[in-house]
Amino acid sequence: MRRRLEMFLTIVVIAVGLWPVVLSQNADDRVRARDLGITPGVFPPGELNAITDVAGVSVGHTTIIAGENIRTGVTAIVPHSSNLFQEKVAGGVFVGNAFGKLAGSTQVEELGTIETPIVLTNTLSVGTAVEATVAHTLRREGNEDVRSVNAVVGETNDGGLNDIRGQHVTPLHVWAAIDNATSGPVTEGSVGAGTGTRAFGWKGGIGTSSRHLPARFGGYTVGVLVQSNYGGVLMMDGVPIGEELGRYSYSPPPQAGTLPSTSPVDATNEGNGSVMIVVATDAPVDARDLKRIAARAVFGLARTGSSYGNGSGDFAIAFTTSSEMRSRFGERTPRPRSILQPDAVSPLFQATLEATEEAVYNSLLQATTVTGNGRTAEAISIEHVTEILRKYGRGR
């Protein structure tokens, strides 16, 4: 049902554009990291190995594909199904490198709460997404007297494959992503806000993963969703995939009279680009420790070979669905609540590192080849990755 809905939304957008569209590769040909025997870390994944393993969390995509130049979209992460403004979730933000935009982050930093869905899109559509998310919140039943809304919107720049200057994202696209968000399996790869992204010289996109802690560590779940669009020297499970395939930041220039084996335009951009990471948990942690959890998500990018370049926006936002940690609008009287103490947070840090690493791999392995704006971003070859993993004694 989920795939049919996203296909419907994509078809609607294409029909509005009135242009023919040719897409490369079938998503059914792609795999996830665990299909190749890549199992980062020591904790097991949740049932879906997705951010939606955290109960109550839902994800929606709007994919916008039209003509030869429009390859973009919107992804919405909704922390719970109730009125978010009236029942704000605790949240925290960590910025690794601030070459980018995470609208609403200053209020999250100040108050430690998130009161709207978290929306991801492209760089020049942040303003539209903020306005649309605010409007969506204002029209929700129970918010008739609301006069201030802090919309949380993140981005990466998909201008390589997408006509980003055309600002093709509209409020309708944002509302569709929010309204059609569901729990259950999350579609990954070249969808939603990941439609036009590139990572490590290949097609990037949306990826997700989760970890479930054993009972002795609280039995909590951590889920991560990434919008990968950054560069560096790709590592998978400790294996130098980027170097082996000859596609990586700061690689030597080809010798005179030769061409590199894989040479799409602007393949690596010397470590620049951006990534948005959203972390969800059901653990009763406060805003301070959620910021620390978000930091581990950014740290987790190092395992994948991120260069954290000057032109890279490396952002993470974390929230908890725990009812203990929710802030009810207008609440002024004290109430008791149970909060996980800092000495018990380390397992959540480990889970976040692992899930972030695997989510990035899934974003690459699930992505399909996309051509747009006069460029082609190739999907990373599953066959080549498998061969290299085996060479290093990894995978299956």
Image (cartoon, rainbow, N blue to C red):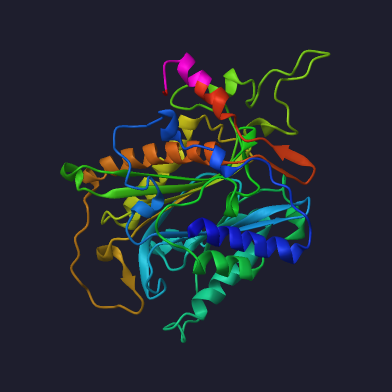
Q: Can residue 232 be seen from the camera position used here? A: yes
Report whether 347 appears left or right of 204.
left
Residue farthest toward the right in the current orientation of the protein = 257
How many numbered marks does the figure carry? 0
Identify the residue at horizontal 42%, vertical 24% (top origin).
395
State left or right for residue 339 relative to residue 330.
Answer: left
Query: Percent x, y for residue 128?
Result: 64, 66
The spot of residue 14 in percent (x, y) is 71, 60
Q: Quadrant of residue 309?
A: top right
Instruction: Please identify the quarter of the rendering in which residue 57 is found.
Output: bottom left
- Vertically, is 120 above or below 97? below
Q: Residue at x 42, y 60 (%)?
A: 58
Please state the extent of the stretch shown in magenta in the rendering.
387-394
Which residue is located at x 50 percent, y 73 percent? 149
Which percent across, then down, holds residue 158? 67, 48
Residue 299 shows up from this direction: no
Residue 242 in the image: state x and y as whole percent.
Answer: 58, 24
In depth, the one of 76 and 329 nearer the eye is 76
Question: Residue 7 magenta-drawn?
Answer: no
Quarter of the image holding residue 34? top left
